[in-house]
Amino acid sequence: MLLKLNTAIKFVKGVGENRAQKYVKLGIFTVGDLLRFYPIRFEDWSAVVPVSSVNDGEVACVRGVVASPPREYIKRPGLKIYYVEISDSRDIFEASFFNQSYVMDQFKVGEEYYFLGKMTILSRGQYGSNALRYLNSPQYIRTDKLPSGLTPVYRQTAGLSSKIIQSAVKNAFDSLDDIEEPLPEEIVRKYSFISKKNALYCMHFPKDDSQLERAKKRLAYEELFLLQIGLIRLKAKNLKSTSYVFNVDYTPEFCSRLPFELTGAQKRAISECVKDMKSASPMNRLLQGDVGSGKTAVAAALIYNAVKNGCQAALMAPTEVLAVQHYNTMSKFFFGQGINIRLLTGSVKAKEKRLIKEELKNGECDLVIGTHAVIQKDVVCRNVGLVITDEQHRFGVNQRGELSSLGKNPHTLVMSATPIPRTLSFIIFGDLDLSVLDEMPAGRQRVETYLVSSDKRERAYSYVKKHLVAGRQGYLVCPLVENKEDDASLEMKSATERFDELSAGFFRGFRLGLLYGKMNPAEKKRVMAAFAAGEIDLLISTTVIEVGVDVPNAVIMVIENAERFGLSQLHQLRGRVGRGQNKSTCILISDNQNPDTIERLRIMTKTSDGFKIADEDLRLRGPGDFFGSRQHGLPDIKTANLLADTALVAKSNADAVNLLSLDPELKDDKYDPLKAAVNRMFSHGLVVN
Ligand code: ADP
Ligand code: MG
């Protein structure tokens, strides 16, 4: 049987029902999923070096002849080590294998092998070894079986080793039907792209690096091109008409009541929005502004405009904590102005919920603030003319469409605190108009940031303690411990361990809180609320601290293993402090010696401008972080992650704009495969027809 991309994985030779279950764990259901499960890296067995040139601890590929039959060494019951003595014409080394008795039959004297692994150089006799050098559990291939080209290495899971996956991929290609080409012929010709099938093949089995690069480029281009066709189409679809054309600009009236002067950027953003809301088609805009840039005041100005122009407004937040915070802020902004504000979240009692819903229906309630989930659920409003969503990056592109379902084509504004480099934002938010708050309110203090190594940890902790004693609060952020095969992570303490250690040790007598992703939501909420209420002095957490949470009394943050975080993520974390009158500090702890990493972390100590940081992140790490972190809520972008090529982004954008200007609805039959591919990519919400 010929396989198609949507054929179930179990039909691939050698997979079957049982293994298919295991593939599910890797998110692989179909042949297409398997072919897009790209290797995490490649091994180059052709880069053989002499044994004598390999240093202790280095990973290398060496070649040698089996010099004597394998030996078994029983270290203790249950732990057998097998040694194979190998000679590479000048030197002798040993390959060692733990509890793998089959090596006794594998290696025959005189056979020649390649070995790939980490070299250890020991003193003679240690662990029963004869050799000074040995390779610990290396991979090996008999020289006559060496594959041509690079060898793919896959992310593995229980029961699915990289080798098994590799052979499934190979088998899949062996019986693969032709793959439809989604890219228009003129584009393929323009860039001399290789065929899609060939590109997929080369992602797994490239002859060399340059072939791999060509394949990546071809697939990344395709993803970006489809994404942009989809987004531009989405934008076009949004150009319907609204029933809420605002006639009067009430911004000056709103400003006269504000306790502060708006920044230039805030004024500009508000006027851009008001201009949209005065027009016949609904506003569909993204407000991007760094943490603390004052997005809430912009939202308030727009809400004021909406209410004074005679309609209702809704403000949605991703979590209850943030919704309550907004409720309090708005109540202050609109105090005494006859604007009826209601809070609608999961914890509101059923009876009150009914009442609020009634008020929304009959128009008595002017502004409803709540969590996205609750407001979406069976709320009917009389005349919602403005829907604002905070921290948009948590919501997907499909949900963007749903937001407006509360009213008849209301104006929508989404607010995001994630600075996305300008070169990328027009892609990631290609379906939205963009306003940017690139200016901070006056008098904002920057968070002093230091980078120190772990031998200064005690000092950093003492500094934290000083603040706690003074009645301030702090955060201690630990990275997730995920990758156990990585040596460095083994030495790394998880949030839980640090919590245990510090509550019994250095911070004994202080009120410590613990927050991590796997905690149940009620417990998380309780801890966060206790911290906000000042009942916890030091919060030890992973990165789950709520984006947008405002605890002005928290003035110090220590980030452990800072090298583990992306710059933009560090910036987001750091934004949790420096929110009050007191000087705030952030201490990054890292022992990483890699010059690139140090350069990256140094940027944090030099600037507090989120956009600058995002640009640096883009320059140093490529767009992967922005596409890969799923913050944007767009369809999954796979290949573009692998590419640090912003030029490609610009090219694909120009091509998409150009194509849609010639055939806005892709009516020509030759674009059917393209349309189908775009629809698959945006599998809900958007239909290009
Ligand atoms: P974010 O953009 O992160 O949501 P907020 O809207 O929470 O930021 O604003 C952060 C703080 O700055 C709030 O306390 C807010 O009252 C204050 N603020 C906002 N705009 C101004 C301004 N123009 N001048 C002074 N303070 C401001
Ligand atoms: Mg905010």
Image (cartoon, rainbow, N blue to C red):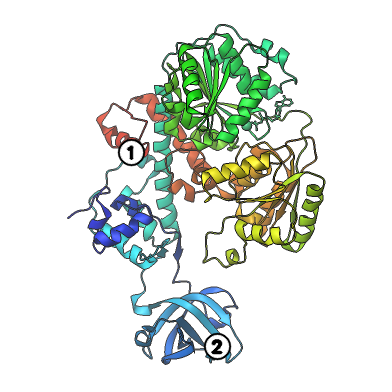
Whole-percent x and y of residue 115? Answer: 45, 78
Mark 1: is the Cβ under 8 angstroms from ligand 2? no
Is residue 354 found left or right of 591 in the rendered image? left
Seen in the picture, residue 419 relative to 335 is either above or below; the reply is below
Q: Which amino acid type corresponds to the residue marked 2 in the rendered image?
A: Tyr
Residue 269 showing in the rendered view: no
Is residue 422 found left or right of 241 in the rendered image? right
Question: Which quadrant does ligand 1 occupy?
Answer: top right
Label 1 secondary element: helix
Residue at 74% from the left image edge and 57% from the top image edge: 507
Label 2 secondary element: helix
Residue at 29% from the left image edge and 58% from the top image edge: 20
Seen in the picture, residue 387 relative to 219 is either above or below; the reply is above
Whole-percent x and y of residue 182? Answer: 32, 40
Q: Which amino acid type corresponds to the residue marked 1 in the rendered image?
A: Arg
Picture quadrant where residue 308 is located: top right
- Identify the residue under disc 1: 680
The label on residue 127 is: 2
Callout 2 environment at 10 Å: few (<14), some (14 to 19), or many (20+)?
few
State the residue lying farthest toward the front.
Answer: 351
The label on residue 138 is: none
Nearest to N terminus: mark 2 or mark 1: 2
Residue 121 showing in the rendered view: yes
Picture quadrant where residue 680 is located: top left
Foreground mark, 2 or 1, reads 2
Seen in the picture, residue 165 relative to 103 is either above or below; the reply is above
Q: Nearer the viewer, residue 105 or 88?
A: 105
Query: Which quarter of the rendering shows the N terminus?
Result: bottom left
